[in-house]
Image (cartoon, rainbow, N blue to C red):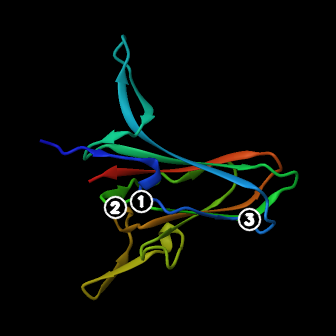
Amino acid sequence: MKRSIRLIVASMLISLSIHAKDNSPIKLVTKAYKEVVKVDKSGKRKVILVDAKKVIPGDIVVYKNIIKNNSKSDAKNMVLNNTIPKHTVYVPDSASCEGNCEILFSVDGGKHFAKAKDLKVKRGGVERVATAKDYTNVRWILSKLGANRETSVSFKTKLK
């Protein structure tokens, strides 16, 4: 029997940090969704997102961060960090953002970040290129968010 795990957004083991150098009033909302496959009357399969109130091993969970700049001026050089929750593994190529941003990853708990192709891990004295299974954190660097604008970033994990 598969064990279910209840997710509460306040305690999802996600660490968030956002910094705007111009001290703009930034609002951040984080939501967790579970991917569910629905089949319509014609037999066509469609993936939909539902609130991730209860997930079981094998489920795909989508974490979406909505960032809103409530000021009358542009917010610049914002950094948003998400920890890959324990008991999950990052889904390859799933980190995304609306508009322009730089996406970086960490394999050491958020101490160092780099592009996916540049990450290396050392296990048993052997260094190798990191894979999605090694990722511990995702970072987005947003160079600019216009006044009174909203954007979002997201990533997926699979529950072990």
- Where disc 2 sits, the SS reads loop
Residue 100 image position (x, y, % from top left): 69, 55
Sequence-wise, the earlier of marks 1 and 2 is 1
Q: Earlier in the sequence, mark 3 or mark 2?
A: 3
Q: Amino acid at mark 2?
A: Lys
Picture disc at residue 93: none
In the image, residue 34 sits, relative to residue 97, either above or below, namely above
- In which quadrant of the rendered view does residue 20 lie? bottom right
- The kind of residue on which mark 1 rests is Leu
Q: Nearer the viewer, residue 52 or 101?
A: 52
| Image mark for residue 86 | 2
Residue on which disc 3 sits: 20
Contact, mark 1 vs mark 2 (Cβ under 8 Å): yes
Location of residue 90 in the rendering, given as x and y in whole percent from the top left corner: 39, 57
Q: Residue furthest bottom?
A: 125
Quadrant including the N terminus: top left
